[in-house]
């Protein structure tokens, strides 16, 4: 088996490539122009990098007319980037916009297809405290109580178990240094919150924010007032 470790490491070490991948971490489709802009490079250079990503089967492409759109379709790459963040050194912030963006990502964000940041961690901690999940070191399992909770809100655990991906796992959150839930159950949670407008995307970034409706419904339907209280007390303003 030909594992091109050097090739992968070289791509991740490249500043332009890593900037493009960080944008793709939001799980949405992006154009070459958008990817080039975020990496501060020319379109033809971004196209060159995209070809490398496609060769490694990291991206999927969607064509609509003359427009080509690209989306990250390799969850292992997303998880690798997220796991590297704790050991990465932040550059000194010299831009107001960069400072605002960092605050948004710290408070809540998409990590590929599941929630991360303060909101993702607080929801995970609430799940565990209410005995919906059990965590032992870095291993996590759902309980019967948890199955009943999710199915009450239309999330079919049996269907999630049948998917060709990890059903339930934890990721070490790079900004919080605590666990958040990933896997198909993490994706299902994020989709439930987004589809029901409990959370919303923050502009074009992968940042997310809790809505007023989300606060109300999470408190009333989940009895999750503790999530809101802890999340707001730790938000970076």
Image: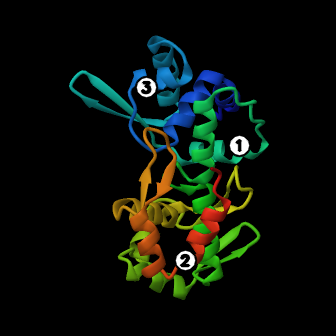
User: Dot 2 surroundings within 10 Å: few (below 14), some, or many (20 or more)?
Assistant: some
| Residue ID at (64%, 36%) | 99
| Residue ID at (52%, 42%) | 25
Foreground residue among 153 and 68: 153
Mark with earlier residue (2, 1):
1
Left or right of 117 on screen, residue 31:
left
Mark with earlier residue (1, 3):
3
Of labels 3 and 2, the one closer to you: 2
Asked which quadrant contains residue 31, the reply is top left
- Spot occupied by residue 52 in the image (x, y as percentages of width and height): 52, 24
- Residue 85 badge: 1
Foreground residue among 130 and 54: 130
- Spot occupied by residue 41 in the image (x, y as percentages of width and height): 53, 15
Up-down relation of residue 118 to residue 99 (above or below): below
Secondary structure under badge 1? helix
Secondary structure under badge 2? helix
Label 2 sits on residue = 225
Of labels 2 and 1, the one closer to you: 2
Label 3 sits on residue = 34
């Amino acid at each position: 088996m030909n594992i091109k470790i050097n090739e992968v490491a070289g791509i991740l070490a490249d500043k332009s490539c890593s900037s493009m991948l960080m944008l793709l971490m939001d799980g949405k489709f992006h154009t070459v122009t958008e990817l080039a802009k975020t990496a501060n490079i020319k379109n033809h250079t971004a196209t060159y990098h995209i070809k490398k990503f496609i060769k490694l089967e990291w991206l999927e492409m969607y064509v609509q007319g003359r427009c080509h759109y690209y989306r990250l379709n390799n969850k292992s790459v997303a998880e690798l980037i997220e796991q590297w963040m704790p050991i990465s050194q932040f550059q000194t912030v010299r831009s107001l916009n960069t400072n605002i963006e960092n605050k948004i990502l710290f408070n809540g964000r998409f990590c590929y297809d599941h929630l991360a940041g303060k909101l993702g961690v607080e929801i995970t901690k609430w799940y565990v405290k209410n005995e919906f999940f059990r965590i032992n070191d870095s291993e996590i399992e759902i309980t019967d109580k948890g199955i009943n909770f999710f199915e009450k809100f239309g999330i079919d655990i049996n269907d999630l178990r049948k998917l060709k991906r990890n059903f339930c796992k934890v990721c070490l959150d790079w900004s919080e240094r605590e666990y958040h839930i990933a896997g198909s159950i993490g994706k299902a949670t994020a989709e439930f919150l987004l589809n029901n407008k409990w959370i919303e995307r923050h502009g074009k970034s992968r940042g997310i924010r809790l809505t007023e409706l989300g606060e109300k419904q999470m408190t009333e339907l989940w009895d999750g007032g503790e999530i809101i209280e802890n999340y707001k007390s730790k938000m970076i303003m």
